[in-house]
Image: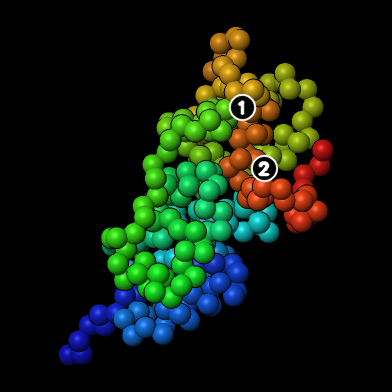
Amino acid sequence: MAGRDCRVRAMVVDDDDINRHGMAGLLELDDRVHVAAALSHDEAMAWAGDWSLVDVALVDAADDRAEGDQFPGVHVVERMRREASRGLTIVVVTGHFFDEAIRRRMWEAGADFFYHRSELADRQALLRVVLEPEACRRIPPPHGSEAQIRLGVTEATRVNRAVAHAVDRDVARTLAERGDPRSRRWFRLRRDFNREARLTPMTADGHLPDRNQDLPALPQIARFLTWATRVKGAPGQRRDDQHTHHRTAP
């Protein structure tokens, strides 16, 4: 009987063709690595291959062209965790390394390690992550930064479940078109959303409301969704550098 292939089986998931094929090509140059697949986010979500044949997955976190949720890598990681029949090491590779929303969402999704794309531009660094993942940088657990506290995000908050709920029900668009915020319709939206999100009610300036309330207000939900689903531009980035078709109506 032929011996088992002892190469590390890797998968690369990235919507950028150059990044995806570049990483896959560099890995294939080493005879210790076999690239099982190099896929876009959509292709990874539809992949019908055997997840047990993947040892290490390199997953890009963000795509600012995506509609609804610009962090499609989160959904890929969640699918990997649901369907992998054995241990699978997941390494997040992103150009948005300091985006707290990405870190929080990938931690919730169950990713293992977290790298800025530039750190893996060197072939030896890329190989080290694939061949020696136990020595890599783990995703830090959630911490109460000022930005998250102002949004009502705590350790109990379920960011990914909140985003899935909001995308499924088109909550962001509904909020942008809202009429009378005092109607029962909006109470139900707030109630149903927070069953998933578990946000702490906060005012726009980051304080607890003067009156005791159990549910976040509509503006807080809108702020939270912008934080949780949108790629943040680099400091000083001009607005006309953004993809204009993702701007929401005022």
SS assignment at label 2: loop
Residue linked to disc 2:
170
Residue found at the very far top of the displayed protein = 211
Residue 195 in the image: state x and y as whole percent: 51, 30
Q: Residue at x 77, y 51 (%)?
A: 238
Assess disc 1: are there few (<14), some (14-19) or many (≥20) residues with their C-alpha within 10 Å of its C-alpha. Answer: some
Q: Closest to the observer: 145 or 122?
A: 122
Locate residue 96 relative to residue 248 in the image: left or right.
Answer: left
Q: Residue at x 56, y 58 (%)?
A: 95
Pick the quarter of the image with the C terminus. top right
Residue 30 sits in quarter: bottom left
Residue linked to disc 1:
190
Q: Are marks 1 and 2 in contact (CB under 8 Å)?
A: no
Residue 245 in the image: state x and y as whole percent: 78, 54
Locate residue 184 relative to residue 44 in the image: left or right.
Answer: right
Residue found at the very far bottom of the displayed protein = 1
| Number of callouts | 2
- Kind of residue at disc 1: Arg
SS assignment at label 1: helix
From what the image shows, is residue 95 above or below residue 231?
A: below
Q: Residue at x 58, y 42 (%)?
A: 228
Q: How is the image coloured?
A: rainbow
